Protein backbone atom coordinates (compact mmCIF):
# COMPACT_ATOMS: atom_id res chain seq x y z
CA UNK A 1 0.00 0.00 0.00
CA UNK A 2 1.12 3.60 -0.64
CA UNK A 3 2.99 5.01 2.31
CA UNK A 4 4.22 1.66 3.54
CA UNK A 5 7.93 1.42 4.30
CA UNK A 6 9.80 -1.75 3.40
CA UNK A 7 12.97 -2.73 5.24
CA UNK A 8 12.85 0.56 7.11
CA UNK A 9 14.06 2.58 4.10
CA UNK A 10 11.92 2.10 0.97
CA UNK A 11 8.74 4.14 1.16
CA UNK A 12 6.14 3.04 -1.42
CA UNK A 13 4.80 6.00 -3.40
CA UNK A 14 2.60 4.69 -6.23
CA UNK A 15 2.03 1.47 -8.18
CA UNK A 16 3.85 1.12 -11.49
CA UNK A 17 2.48 -2.25 -12.52
CA UNK A 18 0.80 -5.37 -11.29
CA UNK A 19 0.78 -8.96 -12.47
CA UNK A 20 0.29 -12.51 -11.28
CA UNK A 21 3.96 -12.82 -10.38
CA UNK A 22 4.46 -9.53 -8.59
CA UNK A 23 3.52 -5.93 -8.09
CA UNK A 24 5.92 -3.07 -8.81
CA UNK A 25 5.96 0.19 -6.91
CA UNK A 26 7.68 3.52 -7.29
CA UNK A 27 9.46 4.06 -3.98
CA UNK A 28 11.75 6.49 -2.22
CA UNK A 29 15.04 5.25 -0.83
CA UNK A 30 15.16 7.34 2.30
CA UNK A 31 18.79 6.56 3.01
CA UNK A 32 20.25 7.45 -0.38
CA UNK A 33 17.49 9.92 -1.27
CA UNK A 34 16.76 8.51 -4.69
CA UNK A 35 13.80 6.95 -6.38
CA UNK A 36 13.78 3.22 -6.95
CA UNK A 37 11.41 0.52 -8.13
CA UNK A 38 10.38 -2.07 -5.57
CA UNK A 39 9.05 -5.41 -6.82
CA UNK A 40 7.11 -7.47 -4.32
CA UNK A 41 6.27 -11.15 -4.86
CA UNK A 42 2.59 -11.86 -5.47
CA UNK A 43 0.67 -13.90 -2.91
CA UNK A 44 0.25 -16.94 -5.21
CA UNK A 45 3.48 -16.66 -7.20
CA UNK A 46 6.37 -19.09 -7.22
CA UNK A 47 8.94 -17.95 -4.67
CA UNK A 48 11.77 -19.98 -6.22
CA UNK A 49 11.31 -18.27 -9.55
CA UNK A 50 11.31 -14.87 -7.90
CA UNK A 51 14.56 -15.69 -6.13
CA UNK A 52 16.06 -16.96 -9.39
CA UNK A 53 15.29 -13.64 -11.06
CA UNK A 54 16.98 -11.79 -8.24
CA UNK A 55 20.12 -13.90 -8.58
CA UNK A 56 20.14 -13.41 -12.34
CA UNK A 57 19.80 -9.65 -12.05
CA UNK A 58 22.51 -9.53 -9.37
CA UNK A 59 24.94 -11.29 -11.73
CA UNK A 60 24.55 -8.61 -14.40
CA UNK A 61 25.95 -5.12 -14.58
CA UNK A 62 25.52 -3.42 -17.92
CA UNK A 63 24.22 -0.02 -19.12
CA UNK A 64 21.46 -1.79 -21.07
CA UNK A 65 20.23 -4.04 -18.26
CA UNK A 66 18.08 -2.89 -15.39
CA UNK A 67 20.25 -2.86 -12.28
CA UNK A 68 19.40 -4.69 -9.05
CA UNK A 69 20.10 -2.65 -5.90
CA UNK A 70 18.83 -4.80 -3.09
CA UNK A 71 16.98 -8.01 -2.19
CA UNK A 72 15.25 -9.06 1.01
CA UNK A 73 12.07 -10.17 2.73
CA UNK A 74 9.37 -8.15 4.54
CA UNK A 75 6.55 -9.81 6.45
CA UNK A 76 7.28 -13.10 4.75
CA UNK A 77 7.22 -11.53 1.29
CA UNK A 78 10.42 -11.38 -0.79
CA UNK A 79 11.14 -8.10 -2.52
CA UNK A 80 13.67 -6.68 -4.97
CA UNK A 81 14.84 -3.10 -5.22
CA UNK A 82 15.61 -2.17 -8.81
CA UNK A 83 16.77 0.82 -10.81
CA UNK A 84 13.88 3.16 -11.52
CA UNK A 85 13.40 3.76 -15.25
CA UNK A 86 11.06 6.70 -15.83
CA UNK A 87 11.11 6.65 -19.65
CA UNK A 88 8.35 4.07 -20.02
CA UNK A 89 8.54 0.87 -22.05
CA UNK A 90 9.21 0.07 -25.67
CA UNK A 91 5.64 -1.22 -25.81
CA UNK A 92 4.47 2.34 -25.10
CA UNK A 93 6.35 3.60 -28.16
CA UNK A 94 5.00 0.87 -30.45
CA UNK A 95 1.39 0.97 -29.32
CA UNK A 96 0.25 3.31 -32.11
CA UNK A 97 1.07 0.71 -34.77
CA UNK A 98 3.60 2.89 -36.61
CA UNK A 99 7.25 2.09 -37.39
CA UNK A 100 9.86 3.82 -35.29
CA UNK A 101 12.14 6.33 -37.01
CA UNK A 102 15.05 4.45 -38.56
CA UNK A 103 17.66 6.14 -36.37
CA UNK A 104 15.72 5.26 -33.21
CA UNK A 105 15.17 1.67 -34.36
CA UNK A 106 18.88 1.27 -35.12
CA UNK A 107 19.95 2.69 -31.78
CA UNK A 108 17.43 0.74 -29.70
CA UNK A 109 18.15 -2.53 -31.52
CA UNK A 110 21.91 -2.14 -31.02
CA UNK A 111 21.56 -1.42 -27.30
CA UNK A 112 19.16 -4.30 -26.68
CA UNK A 113 21.59 -6.60 -28.48
CA UNK A 114 24.43 -5.27 -26.30
CA UNK A 115 22.44 -6.10 -23.16
CA UNK A 116 21.70 -9.59 -24.46
CA UNK A 117 25.36 -10.12 -25.29
CA UNK A 118 26.29 -9.29 -21.70
CA UNK A 119 23.68 -11.66 -20.26
CA UNK A 120 24.47 -14.52 -22.66
CA UNK A 121 28.18 -14.24 -21.93
CA UNK A 122 27.30 -14.97 -18.29
CA UNK A 123 25.13 -17.96 -19.10
CA UNK A 124 21.79 -16.21 -18.60
CA UNK A 125 18.82 -16.42 -20.97
CA UNK A 126 15.95 -13.97 -20.62
CA UNK A 127 13.28 -16.36 -21.96
CA UNK A 128 10.62 -13.66 -22.27
CA UNK A 129 12.12 -10.77 -24.21
CA UNK A 130 9.35 -8.43 -25.39
CA UNK A 131 8.74 -4.66 -25.65
CA UNK A 132 7.07 -4.45 -22.23
CA UNK A 133 10.30 -5.80 -20.71
CA UNK A 134 12.44 -3.12 -22.36
CA UNK A 135 12.36 0.08 -20.30
CA UNK A 136 13.99 3.50 -20.83
CA UNK A 137 15.88 5.61 -18.35
CA UNK A 138 15.82 9.39 -18.18
CA UNK A 139 18.38 9.60 -21.01
CA UNK A 140 16.18 7.39 -23.26
CA UNK A 141 18.62 4.50 -22.97
CA UNK A 142 16.84 1.12 -23.31
CA UNK A 143 17.37 -1.44 -20.56
CA UNK A 144 16.27 -5.06 -20.43
CA UNK A 145 14.27 -5.95 -17.33
CA UNK A 146 12.53 -8.98 -15.77
CA UNK A 147 15.17 -11.67 -16.30
CA UNK A 148 13.77 -15.05 -15.38
CA UNK A 149 10.20 -14.08 -14.57
CA UNK A 150 8.77 -15.40 -17.84
CA UNK A 151 10.16 -18.89 -17.36
CA UNK A 152 6.84 -20.23 -16.17
CA UNK A 153 6.47 -23.09 -18.66
CA UNK A 154 3.57 -25.33 -19.58
CA UNK A 155 -0.06 -24.26 -19.73
CA UNK A 156 0.42 -21.64 -17.01
CA UNK A 157 2.36 -19.33 -19.31
CA UNK A 158 -0.29 -19.56 -22.01
CA UNK A 159 -3.37 -19.09 -19.83
CA UNK A 160 -2.45 -16.37 -17.36
CA UNK A 161 -4.14 -13.08 -18.15
CA UNK A 162 -1.74 -10.38 -19.27
CA UNK A 163 1.04 -12.91 -19.94
CA UNK A 164 -0.55 -14.92 -22.74
CA UNK A 165 -0.45 -12.35 -25.54
CA UNK A 166 3.00 -11.02 -24.74
CA UNK A 167 4.59 -14.45 -24.42
CA UNK A 168 2.78 -15.98 -27.38
CA UNK A 169 3.57 -13.05 -29.67
CA UNK A 170 7.33 -13.28 -29.11
CA UNK A 171 7.88 -16.95 -28.32
CA UNK A 172 10.58 -18.82 -30.22
CA UNK A 173 9.73 -21.95 -32.27
CA UNK A 174 11.76 -24.21 -30.00
CA UNK A 175 10.00 -22.90 -26.90
CA UNK A 176 6.68 -23.42 -28.70
CA UNK A 177 7.67 -27.08 -29.13
CA UNK A 178 8.46 -27.41 -25.43
CA UNK A 179 12.23 -27.40 -25.88
CA UNK A 180 14.56 -25.50 -23.51
CA UNK A 181 15.25 -21.85 -24.24
CA UNK A 182 18.76 -20.93 -25.37
CA UNK A 183 20.50 -17.67 -26.27
CA UNK A 184 19.21 -18.22 -29.82
CA UNK A 185 15.69 -18.15 -28.36
CA UNK A 186 16.30 -14.62 -27.12
CA UNK A 187 17.64 -13.78 -30.59
CA UNK A 188 14.34 -14.91 -32.14
CA UNK A 189 12.34 -12.76 -29.72
CA UNK A 190 14.65 -9.88 -30.60
CA UNK A 191 13.84 -10.51 -34.27
CA UNK A 192 10.13 -10.15 -33.55
CA UNK A 193 10.79 -6.88 -31.71
CA UNK A 194 12.95 -5.56 -34.55
CA UNK A 195 10.31 -6.58 -37.11
CA UNK A 196 7.71 -4.60 -35.18
CA UNK A 197 9.98 -1.55 -34.81
CA UNK A 198 10.53 -1.53 -38.58
CA UNK A 199 6.95 -2.21 -39.73
CA UNK A 200 4.70 -1.17 -36.84
CA UNK A 201 3.18 -4.66 -36.63
CA UNK A 202 3.99 -8.18 -35.52
CA UNK A 203 5.05 -10.84 -38.05
CA UNK A 204 2.21 -13.08 -36.81
CA UNK A 205 -1.13 -11.82 -35.58
CA UNK A 206 -4.00 -13.68 -33.99
CA UNK A 207 -6.34 -13.21 -31.06
CA UNK A 208 -5.80 -16.82 -30.11
CA UNK A 209 -2.61 -17.37 -28.11
CA UNK A 210 -2.32 -21.03 -29.10
CA UNK A 211 -2.66 -20.11 -32.77
CA UNK A 212 0.12 -17.56 -32.36
CA UNK A 213 2.35 -20.22 -30.84
CA UNK A 214 1.60 -22.54 -33.77
CA UNK A 215 2.39 -19.81 -36.29
CA UNK A 216 5.75 -19.09 -34.69
CA UNK A 217 6.48 -22.80 -34.74
CA UNK A 218 5.33 -23.61 -38.29
CA UNK A 219 4.72 -20.60 -40.53
CA UNK A 220 7.35 -18.58 -42.41
CA UNK A 221 7.26 -14.92 -41.40
CA UNK A 222 6.60 -12.20 -43.97
CA UNK A 223 9.60 -10.16 -45.01
CA UNK A 224 10.06 -6.64 -43.75
CA UNK A 225 10.38 -5.47 -47.35
CA UNK A 226 6.95 -6.84 -48.28
CA UNK A 227 5.39 -4.52 -45.69
CA UNK A 228 7.82 -1.64 -45.91
CA UNK A 229 10.02 -1.48 -49.03
CA UNK A 230 12.00 1.52 -47.76
CA UNK A 231 13.20 -0.19 -44.56
CA UNK A 232 16.97 0.00 -43.89
CA UNK A 233 18.51 -3.05 -45.66
CA UNK A 234 20.84 -3.90 -42.78
CA UNK A 235 18.03 -3.99 -40.20
CA UNK A 236 15.80 -5.92 -42.59
CA UNK A 237 18.54 -8.50 -43.12
CA UNK A 238 19.14 -8.93 -39.38
CA UNK A 239 15.41 -9.31 -38.70
CA UNK A 240 15.15 -12.04 -41.34
CA UNK A 241 18.14 -13.91 -39.92
CA UNK A 242 16.90 -13.63 -36.33
CA UNK A 243 13.47 -15.02 -37.30
CA UNK A 244 14.84 -18.26 -38.76
CA UNK A 245 12.88 -21.28 -37.53
CA UNK A 246 16.03 -23.32 -36.96
CA UNK A 247 18.07 -21.89 -34.04
CA UNK A 248 21.32 -22.85 -35.79
CA UNK A 249 20.39 -20.57 -38.70
CA UNK A 250 20.13 -17.48 -36.49
CA UNK A 251 22.89 -15.40 -34.94
CA UNK A 252 23.80 -17.71 -32.08
CA UNK A 253 23.62 -15.13 -29.27
CA UNK A 254 23.58 -11.45 -28.41
CA UNK A 255 27.22 -10.99 -29.33
CA UNK A 256 26.70 -12.38 -32.84
CA UNK A 257 23.54 -10.30 -33.14
CA UNK A 258 25.42 -7.15 -32.21
CA UNK A 259 28.12 -7.95 -34.78
CA UNK A 260 25.45 -8.29 -37.48
CA UNK A 261 23.92 -4.94 -36.57
CA UNK A 262 27.32 -3.23 -36.73
CA UNK A 263 28.37 -4.85 -40.01
CA UNK A 264 29.14 -2.64 -43.00
CA UNK A 265 26.08 -1.78 -45.14
CA UNK A 266 27.31 -3.90 -48.07
CA UNK A 267 28.14 -6.96 -46.00
CA UNK A 268 25.90 -9.98 -46.21
CA UNK A 269 24.40 -11.41 -43.06
CA UNK A 270 26.75 -14.19 -42.02
CA UNK A 271 23.92 -16.55 -41.01
CA UNK A 272 22.32 -16.48 -44.45
CA UNK A 273 25.08 -16.64 -46.85
CA UNK A 274 27.70 -18.01 -44.79
CA UNK A 275 26.73 -20.62 -43.38
CA UNK A 276 25.14 -21.82 -46.63
CA UNK A 277 27.60 -21.33 -49.52
CA UNK A 278 30.71 -23.26 -50.55
CA UNK A 279 33.25 -20.78 -51.92
CA UNK A 280 35.39 -23.51 -53.42
CA UNK A 281 32.45 -24.72 -55.51
CA UNK A 282 31.91 -21.20 -56.76
CA UNK A 283 35.56 -21.03 -57.77
CA UNK A 284 35.24 -24.28 -59.67
CA UNK A 285 32.39 -22.85 -61.67
CA UNK A 286 34.24 -19.67 -62.54
CA UNK A 287 37.65 -21.09 -63.40
CA UNK A 288 36.68 -23.24 -66.45
CA UNK A 289 35.16 -20.23 -68.15
CA UNK A 290 38.42 -18.35 -67.72
CA UNK A 291 40.40 -21.23 -69.22
CA UNK A 292 38.24 -21.46 -72.33
CA UNK A 293 38.72 -17.89 -73.48
CA UNK A 294 42.41 -18.17 -74.46
CA UNK A 295 41.60 -21.36 -76.44
CA UNK A 296 39.39 -19.51 -78.91
CA UNK A 297 42.27 -18.34 -81.20
CA UNK A 298 43.76 -21.85 -81.11
CA UNK A 299 40.45 -23.41 -82.10
CA UNK A 300 40.11 -20.95 -84.96
CA UNK A 301 43.66 -21.69 -86.13
CA UNK A 302 42.99 -25.42 -86.05
CA UNK A 303 39.86 -24.88 -88.12
CA UNK A 304 41.90 -22.93 -90.69
CA UNK A 305 44.50 -25.71 -90.84
CA UNK A 306 41.79 -28.31 -91.39
CA UNK A 307 40.28 -26.14 -94.11
CA UNK A 308 43.63 -25.79 -95.82
CA UNK A 309 44.12 -29.54 -95.57
CA UNK A 310 40.82 -30.04 -97.34
CA UNK A 311 41.79 -27.57 -100.04
CA UNK A 312 45.06 -29.48 -100.52
CA UNK A 313 43.19 -32.60 -101.58
CA UNK A 314 45.41 -32.96 -104.66
CA UNK A 315 48.76 -32.06 -103.10
CA UNK A 316 51.77 -33.76 -104.78
CA UNK A 317 55.46 -33.11 -105.14
CA UNK A 318 56.72 -32.66 -108.66
CA UNK A 319 60.21 -32.50 -110.05
CA UNK A 320 61.68 -30.54 -112.89
CA UNK A 321 63.21 -32.12 -116.08
CA UNK A 322 66.73 -31.50 -114.81
CA UNK A 323 66.24 -33.90 -111.92
CA UNK A 324 66.25 -31.18 -109.26
CA UNK A 325 65.59 -32.05 -105.62
CA UNK A 326 61.88 -32.31 -104.71
CA UNK A 327 59.86 -32.65 -101.51
CA UNK A 328 57.80 -35.81 -101.38
CA UNK A 329 55.16 -35.69 -98.62
CA UNK A 330 54.29 -39.36 -98.93
CA UNK A 331 54.50 -42.32 -96.62
CA UNK A 332 55.29 -45.76 -98.07
CA UNK A 333 52.75 -47.55 -100.20
CA UNK A 334 52.36 -51.25 -100.81
CA UNK A 335 51.47 -51.78 -104.44
CA UNK A 336 49.39 -54.77 -105.48
CA UNK A 337 50.70 -57.10 -108.21
CA UNK A 338 48.64 -57.35 -111.41
CA UNK A 339 48.73 -59.80 -114.30
CA UNK A 340 51.44 -59.35 -116.96
CA UNK A 341 50.64 -57.57 -120.20
CA UNK A 342 47.97 -55.30 -118.70
CA UNK A 343 48.14 -51.58 -119.08
CA UNK A 344 46.81 -49.32 -116.34
CA UNK A 345 46.17 -45.67 -116.04
CA UNK A 346 47.26 -43.93 -112.87
CA UNK A 347 44.54 -41.76 -111.45
CA UNK A 348 45.24 -38.54 -109.53
CA UNK A 349 45.48 -39.17 -105.80
CA UNK A 350 43.71 -37.11 -103.12
CA UNK A 351 46.02 -36.00 -100.35
CA UNK A 352 45.50 -34.72 -96.79
CA UNK A 353 48.64 -33.77 -94.92
CA UNK A 354 48.59 -33.86 -91.13
CA UNK A 355 51.53 -36.16 -90.26
CA UNK A 356 55.06 -34.79 -89.82
CA UNK A 357 57.14 -34.98 -93.06
CA UNK A 358 60.79 -34.71 -94.04
CA UNK A 359 62.55 -33.76 -97.22
CA UNK A 360 63.11 -36.79 -99.50
CA UNK A 361 66.52 -37.43 -101.15
CA UNK A 362 67.09 -36.55 -104.77
CA UNK A 363 65.81 -39.33 -107.06
CA UNK A 364 66.43 -39.93 -110.77
CA UNK A 365 64.33 -42.56 -112.54
CA UNK A 366 65.34 -43.04 -116.15
CA UNK A 367 63.15 -46.04 -116.96
CA UNK A 368 61.42 -47.10 -113.76
CA UNK A 369 58.93 -45.63 -111.36
CA UNK A 370 60.52 -44.19 -108.20
CA UNK A 371 58.42 -44.56 -105.04
CA UNK A 372 60.47 -43.32 -102.11
CA UNK A 373 59.11 -43.61 -98.59
CA UNK A 374 59.17 -40.45 -96.46
CA UNK A 375 57.45 -38.70 -93.56
CA UNK A 376 56.22 -35.16 -94.16
CA UNK A 377 56.69 -32.48 -91.45
CA UNK A 378 53.62 -30.60 -90.27
CA UNK A 379 55.24 -27.33 -91.25
CA UNK A 380 55.85 -28.31 -94.90
CA UNK A 381 52.89 -28.18 -97.26
CA UNK A 382 53.59 -28.83 -100.92
CA UNK A 383 51.96 -26.52 -103.43
CA UNK A 384 48.81 -27.93 -104.92
CA UNK A 385 49.16 -29.54 -108.33
CA UNK A 386 47.27 -31.86 -110.57
CA UNK A 387 48.71 -35.24 -111.31
CA UNK A 388 48.82 -35.97 -115.04
CA UNK A 389 47.44 -39.25 -116.21
CA UNK A 390 50.43 -41.47 -117.11
CA UNK A 391 50.46 -44.72 -119.02
CA UNK A 392 53.58 -46.84 -118.64
CA UNK A 393 54.35 -50.09 -120.51
CA UNK A 394 56.43 -52.41 -118.41
CA UNK A 395 58.33 -55.26 -120.02
CA UNK A 396 57.27 -57.98 -117.66
CA UNK A 397 54.60 -56.65 -115.25
CA UNK A 398 52.28 -53.77 -115.05
CA UNK A 399 51.48 -52.36 -111.63
CA UNK A 400 48.36 -50.49 -110.82
CA UNK A 401 48.82 -47.54 -108.48
CA UNK A 402 45.69 -47.48 -106.34
CA UNK A 403 43.95 -44.28 -105.47
CA UNK A 404 44.34 -43.67 -101.71
CA UNK A 405 42.49 -41.07 -99.64
CA UNK A 406 43.83 -40.55 -96.10
CA UNK A 407 42.13 -38.48 -93.40
CA UNK A 408 45.18 -38.32 -91.19
CA UNK A 409 48.08 -39.51 -93.47
CA UNK A 410 49.50 -38.50 -96.87
CA UNK A 411 49.36 -40.93 -99.79
CA UNK A 412 50.80 -39.92 -103.19
CA UNK A 413 52.62 -41.54 -106.14
CA UNK A 414 55.30 -39.80 -108.18
CA UNK A 415 55.95 -41.13 -111.65
CA UNK A 416 59.09 -40.08 -113.52
CA UNK A 417 58.82 -39.94 -117.29
CA UNK A 418 61.02 -42.17 -119.43
CA UNK A 419 63.92 -40.38 -121.03
Image: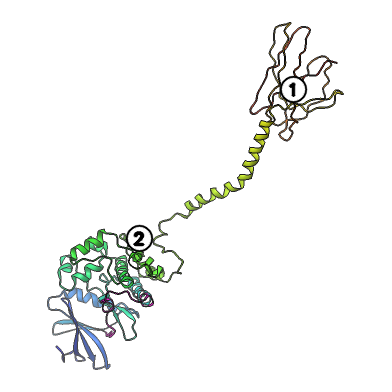
Residue 178 visible: no
Mark 1, secondary structure of its residue:
loop
Q: Which residue is mark 2?
A: 249
Residue at x-position 85% and y-position 26%: 324
Q: Which residues are magenta?
A: 82-105
Cα gap from disc 2 to disc 1, whole angstroms: 79 Å
Up-down: is 418 above or below 263? above
Quarter holding the C terminus is top right
Residue 237 visible: yes
Quarter holding the N terminus is bottom left
Q: Name the quadrant containing residue 131.
A: bottom left
Q: Name the quadrant containing residue 109.
A: bottom left
Question: Could you say where residue 315 lies in the image, as x and y percent from the top left?
Answer: 72, 28
Judged from this view, the residue extending furthest toward the right is: 322
Q: Nearer the viewer, residue 300 or 51?
A: 300
Q: Considering only order in the chain, which callout, 1 or 2, is on the residue closer to the N terminus?
A: 2
Amino acid sequence: MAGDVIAGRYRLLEPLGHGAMSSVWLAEDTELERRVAVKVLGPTADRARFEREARAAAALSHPNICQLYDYGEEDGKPYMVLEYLPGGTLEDQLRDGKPLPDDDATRIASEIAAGLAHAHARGLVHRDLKPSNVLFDAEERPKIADFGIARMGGAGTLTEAGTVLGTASYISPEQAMGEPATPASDVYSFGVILFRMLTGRLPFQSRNAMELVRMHRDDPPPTVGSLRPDAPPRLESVALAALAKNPSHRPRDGRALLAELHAAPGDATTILAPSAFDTSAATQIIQPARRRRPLQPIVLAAAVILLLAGIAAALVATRSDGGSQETLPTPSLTLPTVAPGKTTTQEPTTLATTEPTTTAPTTTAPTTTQRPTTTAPATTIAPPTTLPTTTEILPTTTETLPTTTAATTTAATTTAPAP
